[in-house]
Image (cartoon, grey):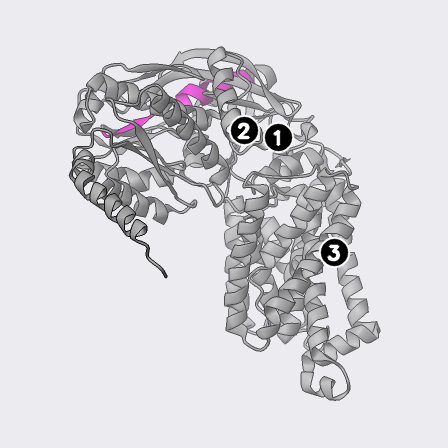
Amino acid sequence: MRISRRDVLKTTALSAAGLLASPAILRHGALGADDPILVGSLHDQSGPIAATGVPMVASLQLAIEEANAAGGLLGRPLKLVHYDTQSTIQMYSQYAQQLALKDKVAIVHGGITSASREAIRPIFDRFKVLYFYNTLYEGGVCDRNIFCTGTTPAQTVEKLVPSAMKDWGKKAYIIAADYNYGQITAKWMTKYVQDNGGEILSTDFFPLDVTNFGPTISKIQAAKPDIILSALVGGNHTAFYRQWASAGMKKEIPIASTTFGLVNEQTTLDAQESDGVLAAYGYFEELTTPASTTYLKKLKDKFGADIPYISEIAAATYEGFYLWLAGAKAAGSLDRMKVIEALESGISFDGPTGKVVLDHATHHATRNAYLGSVKDRHFSVVATYEQQPPSDTAAVCNLIDKPTDNQQYVIKV
Amino acid sequence: MELAAILTLDVLNGVASLILLCTGLAIIFGMMRIINLAHGEFLMLGAYATVVSANAGVNIWVAMLVVAPLFVGAVSLVVERCLIRFLYGRLVDTMLATWGLSLFIVGLVTTIYGNTIQGVPTPLGGFSIGAYRSSLYTLFLVAMAALLLAAVWAVLRYTRLGLIARATMQNPNMAAALGVSPNRVYMATFAVGAAITGLAGGLLAPVSGVVPTMGAAYVAKAFITVVGGGSAILAGTASAAGLFGFINQMAAYLTTPVFGEVTLFVSAIILIRVLPQGISGRFFGRSL
C-alpha cells in the first residue's frame, strides 16, 4: 500500500478535528439534551401469539413517529426499544429486566396474555418502571405502577350477553379456553346470563391444543341451548367454528363471543362459517369515525395494506402510548411518581376508539364499547355504548384509599 | 339410539384422524427407525399446500388429495438427500436433526405466510340423524382412513416394491447382497411416509385452523399412538388409533375436553407400562 503525503494530511486533519470536538460530543451525550427518551416494548412478534403482537408494535411505532414529528416530549425525541418475546413467558421476564436495568426506559408498553403480564408486572414494580398493559383482559389488577387501558368484562361481556339473549333466547352454553382468561371470562358470562334471567346449561373448557371438537358439538346438540357463548382462543380453536358450520349447526344455534376476531377469525373463516357471530370490543376496524379511519389509513400507508386486522388490542396500544405522553407532558418530567400522579388526575385522549379517560381509583380506562356482528367476513358495528367505566375492577380495587395495594383480585361473580 | 349413532360417528372420527396422522409416522419410525420430530411440520406443510393452492383456484379435492401429498413428498426427498441419509442408524441424532428441521420449517412458513390463521371452508356440508346433525366430511375422513390403511397394506403385502421395502428394513445388508440398493429404498420409503403425512395435513386442513405452529398440537398424539401400536406398522397403528381415539372421544363426551386429553395420556402411560413393546408386540406379532 502506498501512502501519499496528501492521504496522511487528510487523515491527520480529520482525526485532529474529531479529537478537538470530542469533549463537546461526549458532554452532549452525557447531559442528554437531545438524547432520545426510550419507550420500552415487550410484544410477541413470533410464535403462536404473534398475530396479535404484530399490529400492537406497528401501532406503537406509528404513535412514536407521530409524536416525534410533533416535537417529541420535553424537547427530546422518543425512541422505541422493542424486544420480541417470542410467545414465551421466560423471554418476558428476561427482557423486562433488560429494559429496566440495561436500557433504563422511561415507560414500558407490553404484555399480551394475562400470564405474560403477571410475569413482568412484579419486575417493573421492583425496579420502579412505569408499565402500561393495553390488552383486553379479565380485570382485577390493582397496582399503582400499572395502567390497564384495554376493556374488561364489565365493559364488553355485560353488553354482549344481554344483547345475545334478547335476540336469541335465555339458555346458554359456554365454551372457553382452559387458562385464566377463559376461566374468569366464563364466570362473568355466567353472572350476566343469570342477571338477565337466563340459564347456563353447561360450561366446557378446552386446552389450547384441542383440535377435534366432534364430541363437544354432539354434547351441545344434546343440551339444545339457544346461544353459544364462546371464549375460545387461538389458531387450534378456530377449528371449532369450521366443524360447527360443517355440521350445519350455524343456522341452528347462534354464537356470541368475547374473542372472535382477535386472531382474525372473520377473514380466515368462510363467510358461511362466520356470518352472524356477535362480538363486543372496545374497537372494530370497521368503525367509521374520522379518528378511526385516519388511524387505520396511517397504519396501512406505513405498513402496507396487508397488515393484519386492527382489533381493540392494537388501537388500545396506540391510545395507551398517547395517554402516557399526555401524562408525561402534564407532569413536565419523566420522574415515575410525578407521571403517575399526572395520569391519575383524569388524563384523557381522543383516539380511534373514541374518548379514553384514565380512572384514578382502578388505573383502568373508561372507554367506549361496541357491539359488532360478522357479515361477509367483516364486522358491522351494530351498537355503541359510550364511556363505559371499568366497574368490575372498581368493585374490588381502590387505589385512592389504598395506594400501596398490589395484587390481581379474582373478582367474585 | 340417535345419540348412540352420533357418538359412534364421533369415535370413528377420532380414530380416523389418528390413523391419518400416524400412518406416515409409523412408516418412517417403524420401518426406518428415524424419529421424525418434524412430523407435525410435514403435516402443516400439507395443510398449507392445500390452503394455498385451493385459495389460488385449484379444486379443493385436487388440492387435498393430489397437491398436498406430492408437495410434501417432494420436500421430504430434499430433506432425505440433504439431511436424513447421513443419519441412518443414529436414532438420537435423527431426533436432534429433525427437531432443528421442524424449527426451520416453522420459521420459513411464518416468514412467507405470516402468523395469521389460514383456512379453506369444509366441503360437503352436513346431514342429520334425528335431532342431531353432523358433517359429511367426517364420514369422508373415516373412508379416507380406511382406504389409506387398505392401500398401504396392499402395497406392502402384494407388490414387489413392498417386498423389497420390507426386506430392506429387516436386513439391509442381505438385501444389498441380492442387488437392492438400500439407499434408494430408504429414500423412497421416507418420501412415501412424508407424502402420507402431507395427505393427512391436506385432509385435516378444512377442519382445523392452519397456522405455522399447528404441528405441535398433533405431534405428541401421533408419537404416542405409534409407540403404543408397536412394531407392526399397520396392525399396531390401527389398533392403537382405535383404542386411543375411542378413549379420547368418549372421555371428552362424558366428562370435559380437559379430561379427554388427560385420560388419553394416562391410558397411554398405562399401556406402555403393561405392554412395553406396544399392542402389536403382544397381539399381532407377525402381521404387517
**Image disc number at residue A309:** 2
User: Which one is in front, B261 or A70?
Assistant: A70
How crowded is the residue under tag 2: few (<14 C-alpha within 10 Å), some, or many (20+)? many
Q: Is residue A198 above or below residue A126?
A: above
Where, quadrant-wise, is the N terminus of chain A in this rendering?
Answer: bottom left
> Can you see residue A153?
yes
Q: Quadrant of residue B271?
A: bottom right
Read off the chain for label 2. Answer: A
Residue under pointer 3: B70
User: Which one is in front, B147 or A298?
Assistant: A298
Measured as percent of width and height from the top left, residue A267 is found at 62, 30
> Can you see residue A150?
no
Measured as percent of width and height from the top left, residue B94 is found at 54, 69
Amino acid type assigned to the residue bearing label 1 in the image? Thr
Q: Quadrant of residue A96?
A: top left
Q: Secondary structure at mark 2?
A: loop
**Image disc number at residue A267:** 1
Question: Of callouts 2 and 1, which one flags the residue occurring earlier in the amino acid sequence?
Answer: 1
Q: Are marks 2 and 1 in contact (CB under 8 Å)?
A: yes
Q: Secondary structure at mark 3?
A: helix
Residue at 46% x, 22% y: name it. Answer: A157
Are tags 3 and 1 found on a single chain? no
Measured as percent of width and height from the top left, residue A37 is found at 27, 31
User: Which one is in front, B134 or A28?
Assistant: A28
Are tags 3 and 2 found on a single chain? no
How crowded is the residue under tag 3: few (<14 C-alpha within 10 Å), some, or many (20+)? many
